[in-house]
Amino acid sequence: MRLCAHFVIAVVYLLTGLLPSRAEDRIVDLVDPFLGTAPLNNAEVIGFKPPWRVWAGLTFPGASLPNAMVQLSPITEFRSGAGYEYEDETIYAFTHTNKGHWNLCYIPILPVTGNVDPSDYGSTFRHENESASPGYYQVKLDRYRINAELTATLRCGFHRYTYPAGETKKLLLNLGVSNERIREWGLEQVGDQAFEGFQDAREKVYFYATTNCPIKSIDQVRRSRRRNLTIVTFEDGEEPLEVRIGLSFVSTDNARANLEAELATSSFGEVRAAAASTWERVLSKIKVSGGTSRERGLFYSCLYRSMLWPALRSDVNREFSDQGGNVIKKDFDYYTNPSLWDDYRNKLVLLAILEPEVTCDVIQSMIDRGNVTGFMPTFFHGDHAAPFIAGSYLRGLRDYDVPRAYELLVANATLESKARPYLDEYISCGYVSTPAIDNPMVETKAKAGVTKTLEYAYDDYAVALLANELGDEKTHQEMVRRAGNYANVFDPSTGLMRGRLDSGQWVEPFDARYPYYEYMYREANAWQSSFFVPHDTEGLVARFSSPTMFEQQVDRLFSIPWDSRHIARNVTCFIGQYCHGNQPDHGFPYLYYWVGKQEKSQVILKEIMTRFYGMDDGRTLCGMDDAGEMSSWYVFNAIGIYPYSPADPEYIVCVPVFDKVELTVGDNVLNIEKRGEGIRIRQITCDSQRVPGYFIPHALLVDGEKLVIDVNAVTN
């Protein structure tokens, strides 16, 4: 029966022309979980000679399921992004939580043998003895001659360690360390083959672990606060050591319940196969054909990276610890906050398309936090819960407390708080001012007034959309008016967005190419900030004397050389002044559409996808993946659509990388087909009806059958 099933699958795939192209192929086998772990080393690509080790993509290669509580991954350096740097040669632990932002990396465990020196316990490894696929990670630890294998469920990690024959099996737990400061920790044996404990850092995480080998002893080896090690020694036996660990952010009892529900009776092979099957289901929601093997590998690696975060925080009994530290039980799955400043641009739109149930629970989780504080949560900068929630609502996602979500968003937009700093000034003056500072530097701390003004204006637009849908005309009109505040920081003499003092004067002197972390701009310079008006790009064009003048300004964006003396750690990889290594200008390649030059945009898009993804050894990204934002950018553009304004339920059409795409949205399958060769879009048709312009509505993804993008070469 199994052979027959494989034969039928092969015939179906070959007839449809979609991947997999051979019976034994699976989409999960195209994914490289190491994408983004390798560093940028080429100064010419970076844009300057870095005086430090470049951050790489801040991704992790370990085992996880989509949006899971557990990310079980190796650590080569604590407090270094995701904790794993491809160029490192020593593994110090396998930890159970990861995001890639210098946090988490909880519950470090390392299998060891012999006497353990608390100041020297890591193991070298070689990449030829290391492998990973969705839901699985493996490495040979040279020092201890142990083959380590990891897999995971939603809330549990499964370790399998094959020790050398005759060696006593030991585990090292260093609970005094994570990627965050540890306030307190604990560990105790709770049975012949079980132990439990906790780490208290920014969050308090509990664990319960069972082993297939009896525990002989648990001993403390103290060297310092961060080298306070626990050694678990096991009775001798020839079989591999298997460790099942359940996590909970509520209690050890819940951690045990999670373990018993998800992992207690399953074998390592069964859990690994189930993880691969889960990923195959998710990744198969977008099936592509055509392109090169490299492009297909990059596509599915990016799609995989896009679906890892936000992370689950509620247990199998649906209990979780809320914003106030109270144990709550609700009828939804509780998730971490999204990385809103980064991923509202595209990743959360992709999540809404492919995993609408998860998206609704993420929003309800944000509402729950907002009920404690009185404001909708934000992340890092801006108030981008507004476009996320408005865009989700307009895409038909309603399975959350919509009225309360709206109340919290209006509170953010009308009451100054940590959600929107300097809001009162923004409302009264129409912009957030820049303080007068002599000789500001990259690291100068100030208000990032230009970026706040631009972002608040877009967030106001998003609130206006939702107000209109919910019949709040007064708020709708006010937010529409405020959405035009971007114009208050537009300097006609330079054609750029520029800082203004509280007096209304422009900031002097002004160097449009100089990058700042939060003076005038947030992690950007003037060029990387000045075109951020996704809700009114037509209005921005109209501020120039002619469309030609706007086009020439965009030409300058992509052609003025980057000054290698301008060094900002996470502002890297340039096309002119455009920076793909950081998020603020990721929508700018499409600007040529507004002057009738779509093909010029496609030149930029193609260069970005070709140059900045899978660089060097194929495992390097041009900047931080930021919880999947950079990966999602590639996914959308590769299939031929992009959420230029994520608050709006529509997508700008570009030339797909692939000849055919099957996009599954709910019960509908939309076929996207590229016809012809070239970079100029000749016409767009949906179900044989011509689409005017370059935008398609979200409804097409839900109900349409075929989107055809006809392209040809540029002949003049």
Image (cartoon, rainbow, N blue to C red):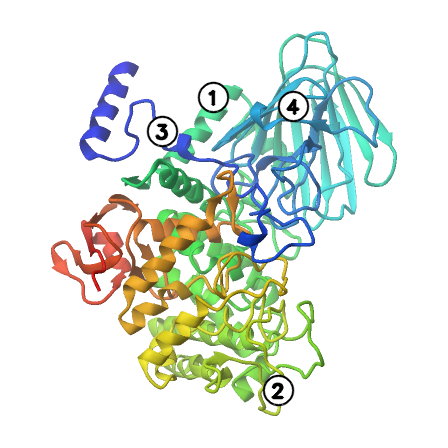
Check disc 1: other Cα within 10 Å, few if <14, some if 14-19, many if 20+.
few
Which image quadrant for residue 659? top left
Q: Mark 3 or mark 2, which is nearer to you?
A: 2
C-alpha span from label 2 to label 1: 63 Å
Dot 1 falls on a residue whose secondary structure is: helix
C-alpha span from label 1 to label 3: 17 Å
Query: Mark 2 or mark 4: which comes first in sequence?
Result: 4
Which image quadrant for residue 377? bottom right
Q: Are discs 2 and 1 less than 8 Å apart at CB?
A: no
Q: Amino acid at mark 3?
A: Arg
Q: Amino acid at mark 2?
A: Leu
Instruction: Depth check: give the residue in front, 328 or 7.
Output: 7
360 horizontally vs 216: left or right:
left
Q: Amino acid at mark 1?
A: Glu
Query: Where is residue 412 drawn, in percent x and y?
Result: 54, 72
- Residue at image coords 67%, 40%: 106
Dot 4 falls on a residue whose secondary structure is: strand
Query: Where is residue 288 drawn, in percent x and y?
Result: 29, 40
Which residue is the site of mark 2? 501
Which residue is the site of mark 3? 26
Instruction: Depth check: give the residue in front, 91 or 335.
Output: 91
